[in-house]
Image (spheres, rainbow, N blue to C red):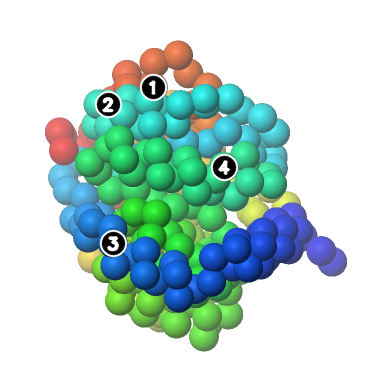
Amino acid sequence: MTTVLDTIIDGVRLDLAARRHRLPLLDVQRRVEQVAAPLDALAALRAPGLGLIAEVKRASPSKGPLAAIPDPAHLAAAYARGGASAISVLTEERRFGGSLADLDAVRARVDIPVLRKDFMVDDYQLWEARAHGADLVLLIVAALTDTQLSTMLHRVDELGMTALVEVHDAEETRRAVDAGAAVIGVNARNLKTLEVHPDVFGELVPLIPEGIVTVAESGITGPADAARYAAAGADAILVGEALVKGTDPAAAAASLIAAGGKGPR
């Protein structure tokens, strides 16, 4: 049966092929040599307090359009003022309305780590992320074989970036740990059905060894959810919809961080 994740990845591969045709890998690699060195995202996420990865997100497959976001750099700057540890930028266009241009704009505006959030299925995308200034990339275990996951983690490390390795169940968590992930994101949203199960983080976090940064993803609607995830052991939370739909993103970011109850970062 074809899942939502399968459909998204089919579109990602088509768009990737078009970009690769326009700009061969060798040219992307040359661009990497010209960009500033990546920021230490791992250190940012390990800082005291509840970390926040605040997301620039126009739409989602589950909710459709969320916010127009005419100036992603302005939104990212507000997140940074609110104390965000990092900014997540959706670059997938078909379902999320994002682009690499959004990543460029955000990178030029903020001085905290930036995550390229997309469905990474090819080495080209990792080079591409670094060429556009990303410090972190998302690797979704459900979309990769063990060999692909290990190979891509190695490439991310070579490029000086940090991988946020996303899991949804116990088997994926085991695979992420075995592959050597330093940051594991537990997504409460099942990408195959788009259903949200808030208890997933609490069920999976005991399977993640001490020292690995844990990030709670999806279903965070406000400070109460942030507090609940912090109490369950989350080092950071990744929040998009609740921030982009509000009127004061800096204040909203600050309130989520404060709700973590782990003291100032």
The number of numbered discs placed on residues in the rendered structure image is 4
- Disc on res. 249: 1
Left or right side of 181 for 141: right
Where is residue 55 shown, x and y percent of the image? 44, 38
Q: Which residue is mark 2?
A: 82
Dots 2 and 1: beta carbons under 8 Å? yes
Q: Which residue is mark 3?
A: 34
Let me know if residue 235 appears in the view.
Answer: yes
Q: CA distance from mark 4 to mark 3?
A: 24 Å
Dots 1 and 3: beta carbons under 8 Å? no
Q: Which residue is mark 4?
A: 98
Q: Amino acid at mark 4?
A: Gly
| Residue displayed at 54% across by 55% down | 118
Q: CA distance from mark 2 to mark 1?
A: 8 Å
Q: Upstream in the sequence, badge 4 or badge 3?
A: 3
Q: Amino acid at mark 1?
A: Pro
| Residue displayed at 31% across by 29% down | 77
Of circles 4 and 2, which is in front? 4
| Residue displayed at 16% across by 45% down | 48
Residue occupying the far right of the picture: 1
Q: Amino acid at mark 3?
A: Gln
